[in-house]
Amino acid sequence: MHRPTPRPILLTRAVVRALVVIGLGFLGLVALIYFKQHSMIYHPRPYGPSYTQVLPANGEEISYTLPFGKQTAFYIPARDNGRLPARLWIAFCGNGSLALDWTTILAGYPNSDDAFLLVDYPGYGKCQGYATIANMRASSDAALDMLAKRFGLSGEDLDPRLCTIGHSLGSAAALDFAARHRIQRVVAISPFTTLREEAACIIGGPLSHLL
């Protein structure tokens, strides 16, 4: 005769099943966060029709090709029309912005002898490729080299004039750029300390260690 399973055993089995389901769900969440971390940091998008008239009349596109695809930055020369600017600002936007978004601020910029090189991250705007730290470094350095060639100079010749500015994620890119060049000034707008602390604000402290 079949004897019914005691209730304590049934309860134990139910608890074990629940713990397994919770554990698998947690592991699934961890895997999702780990494999989606790039899309949580970078939000690339192309230029839409509203950007058609954004580049000033004296602005130039700086195009160059890297192993991960064609890149396009934008140069806005000094308003005093001097051949070389007193300061050349390398500008890095936030993770949800585009390089030409800087033009709304530059419209009221007071120093007429400063110029700006607006750099999009790979995968953003007109740039091909995938945004990574290595690709961002390669792209910004290549943009500066291309601009230097237009002046008939080397990148090192421009170093005494270099400044950099960044917003949000761009602050990290600006500081990274400054660490590799002789920068005269750095402006960081809405910076953060580390990517881990930034991630902690979004997904919480414990899970941020997975990124």
Image (cartoon, grey):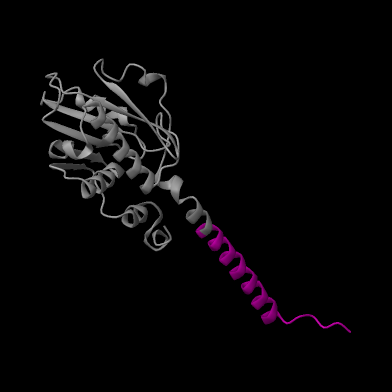
Q: Does 204 appear in magenta?
A: no
x%, y% of residue 104? Answer: 24, 25
The structure residue drawn at horizontal position 62% and vertical position 73%, both measured from the top left corner, is 15
> In the displayed structure, does residue 181 sit left or right of residue 5?
left
| Residue positioned 14% across, 20% down in the render | 79
Q: Is residue 51 left or right of residue 166?
A: right
Give 33 or 184, whichever is nearer the viewer. Answer: 184
As for residue 27 lying within the magenta part, the answer is yes
79 on left or right of 29: left
- The secondary structure that most of the magenta stretch takes on is helix
Q: Position of residue 188 (x, y in %)?
A: 20, 43
Residue at 45% across / 39% down in the picture? 68
Asked which quadrant contains residue 63, the reply is top left
**Residue 102 or residue 86, whichever sits in front:** 86
Name the one closer to the observer, 183 or 201. 183
Q: Residue at x 79, y 80 (%)?
A: 4
Residue 97 point in image, percent of width and height: 34, 34
Residue 76 sits in which quadrant?
top left
Q: Which residues are magenta?
A: 1-30
In the rendered image, the vertical position of residue 200 relative to residue 43, given as above or below: below
Query: If the image is split into quadrants, where does the N terminus sit?
Result: bottom right
